[in-house]
Image (cartoon, rainbow, N blue to C red):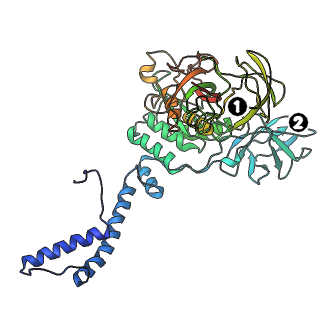
Amino acid sequence: MTSPLYTFTVRDPATIRDDMLRGIRNALIARGVPNPNVTPDSDEYVRAQGLANELAVVEANCILKADEAMPDTATGEALESRAAPYGLSKRPAGGSAGAIVFSSSVASAVAAGSLLADGAGLTYRVTTSGSYANGDTIPVVAVSTGAATNRAAGDKLRWQNAPAYSAPDADVWLGGLVNGTEAEDNETFRARFFAVLQVPPNAGGNWQTHAILAEQSSPAVSKAFVYPALEGGATVHVAVAAAPTATNKNRDVAPITMTGTIIPTLLGALFSPAETTITTVQNVPIDVAFRMDLPDAASASPPGLGGGWLDGSPWPVTNGTQPVMITAVTSTTVLTTNAMTPPQAGVSRIAWLSTLTWTVYSATVIGVTGTPGAYVITLDKPFVGVGVGAFIWPQSVQQDRYVAAILAAFSLMGPGEKTTNTRALVRGYRHPPPSVAWPSSIGSSMRKALTDAGDEVAAAEYIYRTDGVTTLTAGSGLLTPQPPYNITLAPNQYTPRNIGLYRT
Protein backbone atom coordinates (compact mmCIF):
# COMPACT_ATOMS: atom_id res chain seq x y z
CA MET A 1 0.00 0.00 0.00
CA THR A 2 1.37 3.37 -0.92
CA SER A 3 1.74 6.03 1.76
CA PRO A 4 -0.61 9.04 1.66
CA LEU A 5 0.84 12.08 -0.05
CA TYR A 6 0.85 14.01 3.23
CA THR A 7 3.05 11.36 4.91
CA PHE A 8 6.81 11.89 4.60
CA THR A 9 8.62 8.55 4.84
CA VAL A 10 12.29 7.58 4.80
CA ARG A 11 14.03 4.25 4.40
CA ASP A 12 16.22 2.36 6.84
CA PRO A 13 19.70 1.06 5.76
CA ALA A 14 18.40 -2.45 5.00
CA THR A 15 15.70 -1.12 2.65
CA ILE A 16 18.17 1.15 0.83
CA ARG A 17 20.68 -1.71 0.49
CA ASP A 18 18.10 -4.14 -0.87
CA ASP A 19 16.82 -1.51 -3.34
CA MET A 20 20.38 -1.00 -4.63
CA LEU A 21 21.08 -4.73 -4.88
CA ARG A 22 17.82 -5.31 -6.73
CA GLY A 23 18.79 -2.65 -9.27
CA ILE A 24 22.30 -4.06 -9.69
CA ARG A 25 21.02 -7.61 -10.11
CA ASN A 26 18.41 -6.62 -12.71
CA ALA A 27 20.93 -4.52 -14.62
CA LEU A 28 23.45 -7.40 -14.75
CA ILE A 29 20.77 -9.85 -15.91
CA ALA A 30 19.85 -7.43 -18.66
CA ARG A 31 23.51 -7.41 -19.77
CA GLY A 32 23.60 -11.18 -20.02
CA VAL A 33 24.82 -12.30 -16.62
CA PRO A 34 22.49 -15.23 -15.84
CA ASN A 35 22.81 -15.38 -12.06
CA PRO A 36 24.57 -12.28 -10.58
CA ASN A 37 26.06 -12.76 -7.14
CA VAL A 38 24.64 -10.10 -4.78
CA THR A 39 24.60 -12.27 -1.67
CA PRO A 40 26.10 -11.08 1.66
CA ASP A 41 29.52 -12.54 0.73
CA SER A 42 29.75 -10.51 -2.50
CA ASP A 43 31.57 -7.22 -3.15
CA GLU A 44 28.33 -5.68 -4.43
CA TYR A 45 26.60 -6.43 -1.14
CA VAL A 46 29.41 -4.86 0.94
CA ARG A 47 29.41 -1.76 -1.29
CA ALA A 48 25.62 -1.42 -1.16
CA GLN A 49 25.57 -1.79 2.63
CA GLY A 50 28.20 0.93 3.08
CA LEU A 51 26.35 3.36 0.83
CA ALA A 52 23.04 2.52 2.50
CA ASN A 53 24.45 3.33 5.94
CA GLU A 54 25.44 6.81 4.73
CA LEU A 55 22.26 7.50 2.76
CA ALA A 56 20.04 6.51 5.70
CA VAL A 57 21.56 9.35 7.71
CA VAL A 58 20.76 11.81 4.91
CA GLU A 59 17.16 10.61 4.68
CA ALA A 60 16.71 10.73 8.46
CA ASN A 61 17.98 14.31 8.44
CA CYS A 62 15.30 15.11 5.87
CA ILE A 63 12.69 14.17 8.48
CA LEU A 64 14.31 16.52 10.99
CA LYS A 65 14.38 19.34 8.47
CA ALA A 66 10.81 18.69 7.44
CA ASP A 67 9.78 18.86 11.11
CA GLU A 68 11.63 22.14 11.51
CA ALA A 69 9.75 23.58 8.55
CA MET A 70 6.29 22.80 9.94
CA PRO A 71 4.69 24.89 12.72
CA ASP A 72 3.13 21.82 14.36
CA THR A 73 6.46 19.98 14.78
CA ALA A 74 9.15 22.67 14.87
CA THR A 75 10.81 23.33 18.24
CA GLY A 76 13.34 25.73 19.71
CA GLU A 77 15.04 28.09 17.28
CA ALA A 78 13.25 26.54 14.29
CA LEU A 79 9.84 27.33 15.80
CA GLU A 80 10.90 30.87 16.66
CA SER A 81 12.24 31.36 13.13
CA ARG A 82 8.91 30.26 11.66
CA ALA A 83 6.98 32.64 13.92
CA ALA A 84 9.28 35.66 13.60
CA PRO A 85 7.77 36.98 10.31
CA TYR A 86 4.43 37.26 12.15
CA GLY A 87 5.92 39.45 14.84
CA LEU A 88 6.02 36.67 17.42
CA SER A 89 8.83 35.74 19.76
CA LYS A 90 8.99 33.59 22.87
CA ARG A 91 8.25 35.45 26.07
CA PRO A 92 11.15 35.40 28.54
CA ALA A 93 10.77 34.60 32.21
CA GLY A 94 9.18 37.44 34.13
CA GLY A 95 9.25 38.64 37.71
CA SER A 96 6.32 39.18 40.05
CA ALA A 97 4.80 42.50 41.04
CA GLY A 98 2.77 43.84 43.93
CA ALA A 99 3.34 45.86 47.07
CA ILE A 100 4.89 45.67 50.52
CA VAL A 101 3.76 47.22 53.80
CA PHE A 102 6.24 49.77 55.16
CA SER A 103 7.14 49.35 58.81
CA SER A 104 8.82 52.40 60.33
CA SER A 105 8.75 54.44 63.52
CA VAL A 106 8.43 57.69 61.55
CA ALA A 107 7.83 58.67 57.93
CA SER A 108 10.93 57.99 55.84
CA ALA A 109 12.12 58.60 52.32
CA VAL A 110 12.32 55.49 50.17
CA ALA A 111 14.09 55.75 46.83
CA ALA A 112 13.00 54.00 43.67
CA GLY A 113 15.36 51.12 43.02
CA SER A 114 15.80 50.27 46.70
CA LEU A 115 16.30 46.52 46.92
CA LEU A 116 14.81 43.80 49.08
CA ALA A 117 15.37 40.05 49.09
CA ASP A 118 13.35 37.03 50.14
CA GLY A 119 14.57 34.01 52.06
CA ALA A 120 15.75 32.33 48.87
CA GLY A 121 17.88 35.31 47.85
CA LEU A 122 15.57 36.48 45.05
CA THR A 123 15.60 40.27 44.78
CA TYR A 124 12.87 42.90 44.40
CA ARG A 125 13.02 46.66 43.85
CA VAL A 126 10.89 49.64 44.78
CA THR A 127 9.35 51.29 41.73
CA THR A 128 8.13 54.63 43.14
CA SER A 129 10.11 57.07 45.26
CA GLY A 130 8.37 58.88 48.08
CA SER A 131 8.00 59.59 51.74
CA TYR A 132 6.24 56.62 53.31
CA ALA A 133 4.69 56.44 56.77
CA ASN A 134 4.26 53.34 58.90
CA GLY A 135 1.64 51.07 57.32
CA ASP A 136 1.87 52.64 53.85
CA THR A 137 2.08 50.33 50.86
CA ILE A 138 5.08 50.57 48.55
CA PRO A 139 4.90 49.13 44.99
CA VAL A 140 7.66 46.67 44.14
CA VAL A 141 8.59 44.43 41.23
CA ALA A 142 10.90 41.46 41.15
CA VAL A 143 14.38 41.90 39.71
CA SER A 144 14.76 38.14 39.69
CA THR A 145 12.52 36.20 37.35
CA GLY A 146 10.44 33.07 37.36
CA ALA A 147 7.47 31.66 39.25
CA ALA A 148 9.60 31.46 42.41
CA THR A 149 9.31 35.25 42.74
CA ASN A 150 5.59 34.95 43.51
CA ARG A 151 5.08 35.55 47.22
CA ALA A 152 1.99 35.19 49.38
CA ALA A 153 0.55 38.04 51.44
CA GLY A 154 2.37 38.22 54.76
CA ASP A 155 5.67 36.81 53.47
CA LYS A 156 8.65 38.83 54.58
CA LEU A 157 11.21 40.60 52.41
CA ARG A 158 14.39 42.02 53.93
CA TRP A 159 15.78 45.41 52.94
CA GLN A 160 19.32 45.27 51.57
CA ASN A 161 19.82 48.80 52.88
CA ALA A 162 16.89 49.64 55.12
CA PRO A 163 15.54 53.22 54.93
CA ALA A 164 16.07 55.40 57.99
CA TYR A 165 13.90 54.45 60.98
CA SER A 166 12.40 51.44 59.21
CA ALA A 167 12.30 47.83 60.32
CA PRO A 168 14.74 45.50 58.56
CA ASP A 169 11.85 43.50 57.08
CA ALA A 170 8.67 44.36 55.20
CA ASP A 171 5.56 42.21 54.81
CA VAL A 172 4.08 41.46 51.40
CA TRP A 173 0.74 43.29 51.13
CA LEU A 174 -2.69 41.78 50.49
CA GLY A 175 -2.90 39.99 47.16
CA GLY A 176 0.74 38.97 47.32
CA LEU A 177 3.41 39.40 44.68
CA VAL A 178 1.96 37.85 41.53
CA ASN A 179 2.48 37.18 37.80
CA GLY A 180 6.00 35.81 38.07
CA THR A 181 6.37 33.38 35.16
CA GLU A 182 8.86 30.95 33.68
CA ALA A 183 10.15 31.40 30.14
CA GLU A 184 7.54 30.41 27.58
CA ASP A 185 7.74 26.77 26.56
CA ASN A 186 7.43 25.40 23.03
CA GLU A 187 3.80 24.28 23.28
CA THR A 188 2.50 27.52 24.77
CA PHE A 189 4.34 29.48 22.10
CA ARG A 190 3.06 27.11 19.42
CA ALA A 191 -0.54 27.69 20.54
CA ARG A 192 -0.05 31.45 20.15
CA PHE A 193 1.51 30.87 16.73
CA PHE A 194 -1.42 28.73 15.59
CA ALA A 195 -3.85 31.47 16.64
CA VAL A 196 -1.98 33.95 14.47
CA LEU A 197 -1.89 31.56 11.51
CA GLN A 198 -5.65 31.16 11.80
CA VAL A 199 -6.21 34.94 11.90
CA PRO A 200 -3.09 36.75 10.65
CA PRO A 201 -2.43 40.35 11.73
CA ASN A 202 -2.51 43.03 9.07
CA ALA A 203 -1.05 46.45 8.47
CA GLY A 204 -4.40 48.08 9.18
CA GLY A 205 -4.28 46.95 12.79
CA ASN A 206 -6.94 44.22 13.04
CA TRP A 207 -7.83 42.59 16.36
CA GLN A 208 -5.04 40.02 16.03
CA THR A 209 -2.51 42.84 15.69
CA HIS A 210 -3.68 44.28 19.01
CA ALA A 211 -3.55 40.83 20.63
CA ILE A 212 0.00 40.14 19.46
CA LEU A 213 1.26 43.51 20.68
CA ALA A 214 -0.38 42.99 24.07
CA GLU A 215 0.95 39.46 24.47
CA GLN A 216 4.47 40.57 23.58
CA SER A 217 4.37 43.54 25.95
CA SER A 218 5.09 41.58 29.14
CA PRO A 219 5.77 37.99 30.24
CA ALA A 220 2.88 38.48 32.67
CA VAL A 221 0.38 38.36 29.79
CA SER A 222 -0.75 34.83 29.03
CA LYS A 223 -3.46 35.81 26.55
CA ALA A 224 -4.99 39.02 25.20
CA PHE A 225 -8.64 39.37 24.24
CA VAL A 226 -9.93 42.11 21.95
CA TYR A 227 -13.36 43.76 21.75
CA PRO A 228 -13.41 45.86 18.53
CA ALA A 229 -15.75 48.83 18.05
CA LEU A 230 -17.61 48.07 21.27
CA GLU A 231 -17.72 51.72 22.33
CA GLY A 232 -18.50 52.93 18.82
CA GLY A 233 -16.54 53.37 15.62
CA ALA A 234 -12.75 53.65 15.85
CA THR A 235 -12.63 52.15 19.36
CA VAL A 236 -11.05 48.96 20.64
CA HIS A 237 -10.83 47.36 24.08
CA VAL A 238 -7.90 45.04 24.88
CA ALA A 239 -8.17 42.86 28.00
CA VAL A 240 -5.08 40.94 29.12
CA ALA A 241 -5.12 37.85 31.31
CA ALA A 242 -2.30 36.29 33.29
CA ALA A 243 -1.62 32.59 33.55
CA PRO A 244 -2.64 30.84 36.79
CA THR A 245 0.20 29.52 38.93
CA ALA A 246 0.49 26.58 41.30
CA THR A 247 -0.59 28.73 44.26
CA ASN A 248 -2.62 31.52 42.62
CA LYS A 249 -5.48 30.80 40.22
CA ASN A 250 -6.44 34.44 39.63
CA ARG A 251 -6.06 35.72 36.09
CA ASP A 252 -5.67 39.47 36.58
CA VAL A 253 -2.38 41.21 35.86
CA ALA A 254 -0.89 43.28 38.70
CA PRO A 255 -1.78 47.02 38.47
CA ILE A 256 1.86 48.07 38.58
CA THR A 257 2.58 45.88 35.55
CA MET A 258 -0.45 47.26 33.72
CA THR A 259 0.39 50.93 34.26
CA GLY A 260 4.15 50.61 34.21
CA THR A 261 4.66 48.23 31.29
CA ILE A 262 1.69 46.89 29.35
CA ILE A 263 -0.38 50.03 28.74
CA PRO A 264 2.50 52.32 27.70
CA THR A 265 4.10 49.59 25.58
CA LEU A 266 0.88 48.81 23.75
CA LEU A 267 -0.11 52.43 23.19
CA GLY A 268 3.37 53.24 21.96
CA ALA A 269 3.32 50.38 19.46
CA LEU A 270 -0.15 50.98 18.06
CA PHE A 271 -0.31 52.89 14.79
CA SER A 272 -4.09 52.70 14.55
CA PRO A 273 -6.06 55.93 15.13
CA ALA A 274 -8.61 53.98 17.19
CA GLU A 275 -9.37 55.03 20.74
CA THR A 276 -7.91 52.19 22.79
CA THR A 277 -8.98 50.98 26.23
CA ILE A 278 -6.58 48.56 27.93
CA THR A 279 -7.49 46.63 31.07
CA THR A 280 -6.81 43.34 32.73
CA VAL A 281 -9.68 40.95 33.62
CA GLN A 282 -11.92 40.88 36.69
CA ASN A 283 -11.71 37.61 38.64
CA VAL A 284 -15.03 35.95 39.46
CA PRO A 285 -14.61 32.91 41.78
CA ILE A 286 -16.65 29.86 40.83
CA ASP A 287 -17.91 26.98 42.96
CA VAL A 288 -18.51 23.79 41.00
CA ALA A 289 -19.52 20.28 42.03
CA PHE A 290 -19.75 17.11 39.95
CA ARG A 291 -21.40 13.74 40.26
CA MET A 292 -18.94 11.09 39.04
CA ASP A 293 -19.48 7.51 37.92
CA LEU A 294 -16.41 5.69 39.25
CA PRO A 295 -15.78 2.02 40.09
CA ASP A 296 -16.92 0.98 43.56
CA ALA A 297 -14.34 -0.06 46.13
CA ALA A 298 -13.58 -3.74 46.67
CA SER A 299 -15.10 -3.32 50.15
CA ALA A 300 -18.48 -2.27 48.71
CA SER A 301 -21.52 -4.54 48.82
CA PRO A 302 -21.54 -6.02 46.26
CA PRO A 303 -17.75 -5.67 45.82
CA GLY A 304 -16.58 -3.27 43.13
CA LEU A 305 -13.59 -3.41 40.81
CA GLY A 306 -11.63 -0.83 42.81
CA GLY A 307 -9.61 2.01 41.40
CA GLY A 308 -12.41 4.51 42.05
CA TRP A 309 -14.02 5.34 45.41
CA LEU A 310 -11.94 4.30 48.41
CA ASP A 311 -14.81 3.44 50.75
CA GLY A 312 -17.51 0.83 50.27
CA SER A 313 -20.10 3.50 51.17
CA PRO A 314 -18.56 6.83 50.10
CA TRP A 315 -19.47 9.76 52.37
CA PRO A 316 -20.58 12.53 52.18
CA VAL A 317 -23.56 11.93 49.91
CA THR A 318 -24.97 14.85 47.94
CA ASN A 319 -28.73 15.32 47.94
CA GLY A 320 -28.57 15.70 44.16
CA THR A 321 -28.65 19.47 43.84
CA GLN A 322 -26.31 20.71 46.56
CA PRO A 323 -22.70 19.94 47.50
CA VAL A 324 -21.83 19.09 51.08
CA MET A 325 -20.08 22.03 52.66
CA ILE A 326 -18.66 23.30 55.93
CA THR A 327 -21.16 25.46 57.81
CA ALA A 328 -19.09 26.13 60.93
CA VAL A 329 -15.45 25.71 61.98
CA THR A 330 -14.73 24.91 65.62
CA SER A 331 -11.11 23.97 64.90
CA THR A 332 -9.10 22.53 62.05
CA THR A 333 -10.27 19.06 63.09
CA VAL A 334 -13.81 19.78 64.31
CA LEU A 335 -16.18 20.92 61.56
CA THR A 336 -19.93 21.27 61.14
CA THR A 337 -21.42 20.19 57.80
CA ASN A 338 -24.78 20.40 56.06
CA ALA A 339 -24.69 16.66 55.27
CA MET A 340 -28.08 14.96 55.56
CA THR A 341 -26.62 11.53 56.42
CA PRO A 342 -23.96 10.73 59.04
CA PRO A 343 -20.49 9.36 58.27
CA GLN A 344 -19.12 6.16 59.79
CA ALA A 345 -16.58 7.03 62.47
CA GLY A 346 -13.24 5.41 61.77
CA VAL A 347 -14.33 4.45 58.25
CA SER A 348 -15.43 7.45 56.19
CA ARG A 349 -12.56 9.15 54.39
CA ILE A 350 -13.09 12.63 53.01
CA ALA A 351 -11.21 15.14 50.87
CA TRP A 352 -11.03 18.93 50.59
CA LEU A 353 -9.31 21.27 48.13
CA SER A 354 -7.47 24.14 49.83
CA THR A 355 -7.84 27.43 47.98
CA LEU A 356 -4.69 28.66 49.73
CA THR A 357 -2.28 25.98 48.49
CA TRP A 358 -4.49 24.41 45.78
CA THR A 359 -3.64 21.02 47.21
CA VAL A 360 -6.10 18.21 47.94
CA TYR A 361 -6.07 17.22 51.62
CA SER A 362 -7.54 14.00 53.00
CA ALA A 363 -8.64 12.82 56.43
CA THR A 364 -10.64 10.10 58.15
CA VAL A 365 -13.70 10.94 60.23
CA ILE A 366 -13.05 9.61 63.76
CA GLY A 367 -16.08 11.08 65.52
CA VAL A 368 -19.56 12.35 64.67
CA THR A 369 -22.36 14.08 66.58
CA GLY A 370 -25.31 16.25 65.64
CA THR A 371 -28.37 15.88 63.47
CA PRO A 372 -29.19 15.84 59.74
CA GLY A 373 -28.11 19.09 58.14
CA ALA A 374 -25.82 19.87 61.09
CA TYR A 375 -23.53 16.90 61.65
CA VAL A 376 -20.35 17.76 63.55
CA ILE A 377 -17.38 15.67 62.43
CA THR A 378 -13.98 15.18 64.06
CA LEU A 379 -11.02 14.42 61.76
CA ASP A 380 -7.82 12.51 62.39
CA LYS A 381 -5.83 15.12 60.43
CA PRO A 382 -6.28 18.91 60.44
CA PHE A 383 -7.71 20.79 57.49
CA VAL A 384 -5.52 23.86 57.98
CA GLY A 385 -7.10 26.94 56.42
CA VAL A 386 -10.54 25.40 55.89
CA GLY A 387 -13.41 27.88 56.14
CA VAL A 388 -17.16 28.13 56.04
CA GLY A 389 -18.44 27.33 52.56
CA ALA A 390 -15.65 24.88 51.70
CA PHE A 391 -16.79 21.68 49.97
CA ILE A 392 -15.95 18.25 51.36
CA TRP A 393 -16.33 15.05 49.34
CA PRO A 394 -15.53 11.32 49.51
CA GLN A 395 -12.00 10.23 48.72
CA SER A 396 -11.18 8.45 45.47
CA VAL A 397 -7.99 6.82 44.23
CA GLN A 398 -7.29 9.39 41.50
CA GLN A 399 -8.79 12.48 43.14
CA ASP A 400 -5.65 14.57 42.56
CA ARG A 401 -5.85 13.84 38.84
CA TYR A 402 -9.51 14.86 38.68
CA VAL A 403 -8.89 18.14 40.45
CA ALA A 404 -5.89 18.83 38.20
CA ALA A 405 -8.09 18.28 35.13
CA ILE A 406 -10.67 20.77 36.39
CA LEU A 407 -8.02 23.36 37.24
CA ALA A 408 -6.43 22.87 33.81
CA ALA A 409 -9.81 23.51 32.19
CA PHE A 410 -10.14 26.74 34.18
CA SER A 411 -6.67 27.80 32.99
CA LEU A 412 -7.83 27.56 29.36
CA MET A 413 -10.82 29.85 29.91
CA GLY A 414 -11.07 33.46 28.82
CA PRO A 415 -13.25 36.40 29.88
CA GLY A 416 -16.87 36.84 28.90
CA GLU A 417 -18.54 39.45 26.74
CA LYS A 418 -18.74 43.11 27.78
CA THR A 419 -22.37 43.72 26.89
CA THR A 420 -25.63 41.95 26.14
CA ASN A 421 -26.57 44.55 23.52
CA THR A 422 -27.01 42.49 20.36
CA ARG A 423 -26.43 45.49 18.10
CA ALA A 424 -23.11 46.26 19.78
CA LEU A 425 -22.13 42.59 19.62
CA VAL A 426 -22.39 42.55 15.83
CA ARG A 427 -18.81 43.86 15.81
CA GLY A 428 -17.91 44.12 19.47
CA TYR A 429 -17.96 40.48 20.54
CA ARG A 430 -14.85 39.02 22.14
CA HIS A 431 -12.02 37.99 19.82
CA PRO A 432 -11.17 35.16 19.63
CA PRO A 433 -14.80 34.06 20.04
CA PRO A 434 -15.44 31.78 23.05
CA SER A 435 -16.97 29.23 20.68
CA VAL A 436 -13.63 28.90 18.88
CA ALA A 437 -11.03 29.12 21.67
CA TRP A 438 -10.70 30.08 25.34
CA PRO A 439 -14.32 29.39 26.36
CA SER A 440 -15.78 31.81 28.91
CA SER A 441 -18.65 29.67 30.26
CA ILE A 442 -18.68 26.67 32.59
CA GLY A 443 -20.06 23.97 30.31
CA SER A 444 -19.20 20.92 28.27
CA SER A 445 -15.45 21.59 27.92
CA MET A 446 -14.84 21.29 31.66
CA ARG A 447 -17.04 18.21 31.95
CA LYS A 448 -15.14 16.59 29.08
CA ALA A 449 -11.80 17.40 30.75
CA LEU A 450 -13.02 15.48 33.81
CA THR A 451 -14.28 12.46 31.88
CA ASP A 452 -10.99 12.37 29.94
CA ALA A 453 -8.96 12.39 33.17
CA GLY A 454 -8.94 8.60 33.42
CA ASP A 455 -10.29 5.46 31.79
CA GLU A 456 -12.06 4.60 35.04
CA VAL A 457 -14.32 7.67 34.75
CA ALA A 458 -17.48 6.30 33.14
CA ALA A 459 -19.32 9.62 33.29
CA ALA A 460 -19.42 13.00 35.02
CA GLU A 461 -22.15 15.59 35.25
CA TYR A 462 -22.67 18.89 37.03
CA ILE A 463 -24.82 19.05 40.13
CA TYR A 464 -23.97 22.61 41.20
CA ARG A 465 -22.42 25.71 39.65
CA THR A 466 -22.50 29.25 41.00
CA ASP A 467 -20.71 32.56 40.45
CA GLY A 468 -22.50 34.30 43.29
CA VAL A 469 -25.08 35.82 40.93
CA THR A 470 -26.33 32.83 38.96
CA THR A 471 -26.66 29.32 40.40
CA LEU A 472 -27.31 26.22 38.31
CA THR A 473 -28.27 22.94 39.99
CA ALA A 474 -28.92 21.00 36.78
CA GLY A 475 -26.42 19.18 34.62
CA SER A 476 -27.35 20.99 31.42
CA GLY A 477 -26.91 24.60 30.39
CA LEU A 478 -24.07 27.08 30.66
CA LEU A 479 -22.92 29.27 33.52
CA THR A 480 -21.87 32.45 31.71
CA PRO A 481 -20.06 35.53 33.08
CA GLN A 482 -22.14 38.65 33.58
CA PRO A 483 -21.01 41.66 31.52
CA PRO A 484 -19.56 44.54 33.59
CA TYR A 485 -22.03 47.32 34.40
CA ASN A 486 -19.97 49.70 32.23
CA ILE A 487 -18.46 48.60 28.92
CA THR A 488 -15.23 50.47 29.66
CA LEU A 489 -14.55 48.20 32.65
CA ALA A 490 -12.63 44.94 32.68
CA PRO A 491 -14.56 41.86 31.49
CA ASN A 492 -15.39 39.13 33.99
CA GLN A 493 -13.17 36.05 34.09
CA TYR A 494 -14.18 32.85 35.87
CA THR A 495 -11.58 31.42 38.28
CA PRO A 496 -11.82 28.30 40.49
CA ARG A 497 -12.74 28.29 44.15
CA ASN A 498 -14.59 25.39 45.80
CA ILE A 499 -14.64 22.04 43.96
CA GLY A 500 -16.58 18.92 44.93
CA LEU A 501 -16.61 15.37 43.49
CA TYR A 502 -19.46 13.08 44.53
CA ARG A 503 -20.67 9.58 43.80
CA THR A 504 -23.51 9.12 41.29
Q: Which residue is painted at 16% across and 76% down in the image?
A: 24
Q: Position of residue 438 (x, y in %)?
A: 49, 33
Which of these two is toward me, 369 or 131? 369
Q: Which mark is residue 405?
A: none
* Residue 199 left/right relative to 96: left
Looking at the picture, does residue 68 appear above or below residue 21? above
Q: State whether residue 490 appears in this view.
A: no
Question: Residue 234's x, y, as percent?
Answer: 46, 26
Crowd rating for badge 2 (residues with CA inside 10 Å; few <14, some 14–19, many 20+): some
- Which quadrant would residue 250 be assigned to in this image? top right
**Which kind of residue does numbered mark 1 sit on?**
Ile
Name the residue type under label 2. Asn
SS at badge 1: strand
In the displayed structure, would residue 226 be above or below residue 105? Answer: above
| Residue under label 2 | 134
The Cα–Cα distance between marks 2 and 1, rounded to whole angstroms, is: 45 Å
Nearest to the observer: residue 35 or residue 487: 35
Give the x, y percent position of residue 495: 61, 30
Disc 1: which residue: 350
Which of the two discs, 2 and 1, sits closer to the camera? 1
> Is 255 left, or right, of 296 in this rendering?
right
The tag earlier along the polypeptide, 2 or 1, is 2
Q: Secondary structure at mark 2?
A: loop
Nearer-the-camera pick, 47 or 185: 47
Location of residue 376 in the rendering, given as x and y in whole percent from the top left corner:
79, 22
